Image (spheres, helix red, strand yellow):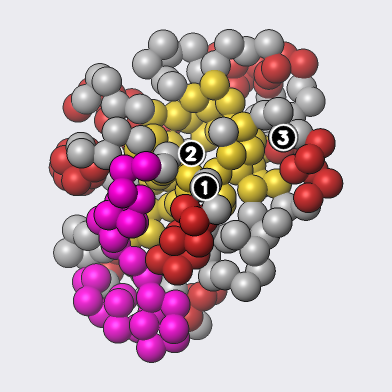
Amino acid sequence: MHLIHRGLVNKKFKENVLASFKQSFKKGFGIETDIHATKDKQFVCFHDFTLKRTFKISKSIKNLNYQRIKEISKSKKAEIPLLSDLLKLSKKRFFLFIEIKPLFTKDLLKKLITETKAYSKCVFISFKHKNIYDILKIKKQAKVGLSFGNNLSAKTIINQSKNKNIKCIVLDRCFLENKKIKNLKKEKYFYTIKTKKDFLKHQNNNLIFENL
C-alpha cells in the first residue's frame, strides 16, 4: 500500500490542506498526515509545532484556538483543516495514517479515539512512542504503529517493535535495503519517497511518497 505524504500529490499542491487531500483520494491513495491539538482541544492537520515556517508568525498551535488558526491560514489561502474535515472527506474509503506530533495527554488521546471511532481505516503513528502505548491502554484493538528516524540502528528498531499489538512500523527510507529490517515480520512503511526513480525501484514496498 502506498500513501501520499501530507497530501502532496505534486508540486502544485500545498501540504495538509483539504484540496490536496481531495486530490490524493481522487488518485486512489491514502494519506499520511500530522496532527496537533489546539488550545481549545481541536485536532488540526498540520506538521509544525508553530506557524512560523508556513505563515511567518511565531505562534504555537497549542496556544491558539482553532478559530484564530483558521482565520490566519485562510487569509494566506492555505486553510488548516480539522482532522474531522479530513475524516469526512475520506468517506471511510481510504487509509489515513495519523501521525501524532506532540506528546498528548491521555484525555486528548481518549478524545482522538472517540472522534475517529467510526473510521476503521485510521492508523495512529508517532515518533513519541508513549502516545502509541497510551492509546493501547485505552483501546487495545486500536490500529497503531511506531515511527523511527534514521538515527537508530536496525537492532534498536527490531527490539522496540516486538509488541504484538503494534500493527506496523514507519521507517526512514535509508532502511529500505537493510536485511535485518527486511526479515522483521512486521508491516513496514518507508518515508519519504520523493523521486519517480525511487518510487519505481521500491514500489513492491509500502511507501509514503510525495510530489510525483
In the picture of the structure, the residue carrying the numbered disc 3 is 203
Q: Are marks 2 and 1 in contact (CB under 8 Å)?
A: no
Q: What residue is at 52 percent from the left and 46 percent from the top? A: 29
Give 75 or 21, whichever is nearer the viewer. Answer: 21
Q: Is residue 192 magenta?
A: no
Give 65 or 96, whichever is nearer the viewer. Answer: 96
In the picture of the structure, the residue carrying the numbered disc 2 is 127
Residue 33 appears left or right of 85: right
Mark 2 or 1, nearer chain start: 1
In the picture of the structure, the residue carrying the numbered disc 1 is 28
Q: Estimate the spatial distance between the alpha carbons at disc 3 and disc 1, rounded to whole Å.
A: 15 Å
Q: Estimate the spatial distance between the alpha carbons at disc 2 and disc 3, rounded to whole Å.
A: 24 Å
Give the percent coordinates (x, y) of residue 131: 34, 35
- The amino acid sitting under disc 3 is Gln
- The amino acid sitting under disc 1 is Gly
Magenta range is 65-93
Residue 179 appears left or right of 14: right
- Quarter the C terminus occupies: bottom right
Give the percent coordinates (x, y) of residue 193: 70, 46
Mark 2 or 3, nearer chain start: 2
